[in-house]
Amino acid sequence: MKSLADLKSFLARAWVQGAIPPALLVLLILIVEIGSPGFLTGETLSLLLSNTAVLFILACGVTFVILIGGIDLSIQAVASLASVIVAQLLPSLGLLAFPVAIFAGLVFGILSGVVHVRLKVPSFVATLATGGVVAGIALWSADGRAITIEEAGRANTSWINADVVGMPVVAIMAIIVGLIAFLALRYTRFGRHSIAVGAGEPAAIAAGINVNRTKIVAFAVSGTLAAIAGVILAARLSSGSPSLANQLLLPAIAAVIVGGTAITGGLGGVARTAVGALIISIVRIGMTFVGVNIFFENVIFGAVLILAVAITIDRSKIAIIK
C-alpha cells in the first residue's frame, strides 16, 4: 500500500507542476491586459511571437540537457558566435553561411558533451569553460566589434523577417523546431533514454542505456539549436556580435524551469518549455507596457527562477542541498 500511496503522491505532484505554468500564463496575460488595455492586439501578439521564437529555440535545446540532469551555460556564447559567422560569411557564401554557422554550434555542443562525459567534468564547469572558449573565438574573429550585415547579405536574410499569412516566419521556424523536438523526445529512443538518465542514472546504466552517448547527443542538440537561434537573431538585427545573445542565458534557463521541467532532470518536456518561453516573453514585454524599468528585468527573472526551482526540484533525489 505504501508504494501505491507514493505513486499517487508522485502523480499528484506531477499534475500540479504541469498545471501551474499554463495557469500562470493566463494570469499574466490578464494582468498585463488589465494594467495596459490594448495589449492583446494583432501587432503586439506578432511582436510577442517573434520575440518568443528565438528564446524558445534557445531554451528548447537546453531542455534536453536539463532533462538528463545537466546544465548548459555555453548557449549564449554559441548563439553569439553563430551570429558572427553568418555576418562574416553571408557576402561570400550566401545562404551557405547558415549551415556553416549551425555546424559550428553542433561541434561546440559535442565538445561540451565530450568534456563532461570523457573527462568527468561537471556539466556546470564543462559548459562554462566551453562557453569561455567560444566567446573568445567570437571576440577574436569579429575583432571585438559588431559586424553589420550589408545590403547584399540582407537579401539572403529578408525571408526570415517576413510574414506568411500574418504569421512571422521566425514563429513558424520555432514551431517547426518545437514540433521536431517534441516528437524526438516523445517517440525516439534518444528521447526516452534522456528522461531515463535524468530520472536515475544508475538505473539507466543497469537497464543497458548508453548514458555517455545520450549525454553527448543532448549537448549536441543544445549547441545546434543555440546556433540556429543565433542565426535568426543576426538576421533579425542585421548584424552579428560576440555579445549578441549574452542577455539570453538567464531567460532561456528560466523558460525551461518556469515551464515545469525539473532542474534535477527526468521530468518535463518541450511543450512545457514553450509555455515557459511565453511566460518569460510576456513578463519582458509586459514590464514595458506597465512602465517597469527595463534595467529591472534580470531582477524579475532571477526571482522567478528561484521560485520555479523551489517548486519543481525533486528533493527525493538530493539528500543534501549544496
Image (cartoon, helix red, strand yellow):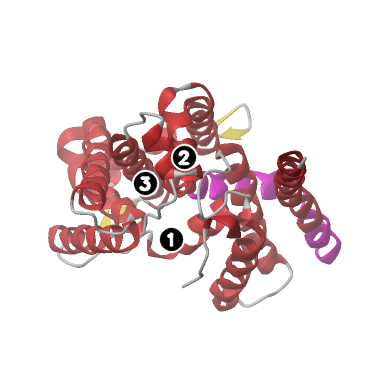
Amino acid type of the residue that numbered disc 1 sits on in the rendered structure: Leu
Report helix, strand or loop for mark 1: helix
Report helix, strand or loop for mark 2: helix
Residue 314 shows in the view:
no
For the stretch drawn in magenta, the main secondary structure is helix
**Which numbered dot is residue 249?**
1
> Where does the magenta region start and end?
29-56
Q: Is residue 219 magenta?
A: no
Q: Quick check: marks 2 and 1 in contact, CB under 8 Å?
A: no
Image position, residue 242 (x, y; %) = 26, 61
Amino acid type of the residue that numbered disc 3 sits on in the rendered structure: Ala
Give the alpha-carbon distance from disc 2 to disc 3, as whole Å: 19 Å
Q: State the residue at coordinates (19%, 67%).
A: 144
Image position, residue 268 (x, y; %) = 58, 43
**Which numbered dot is residue 161?**
2
Give the alpha-carbon distance from disc 2 to disc 1, as whole Å: 23 Å
Report whether 114 appears left or right of 172. left
Q: Nearer the viewer, residue 26 or 16?
A: 16
What residue is pinned by disc 3?
226
Mark 3 packing: few (<14 Cα in 10 Å), some, or many (20+)? many
Q: Give the mark, 2 or 3, whose residue is nearer the N terminus.
A: 2
Residue 317 shows in the view:
yes
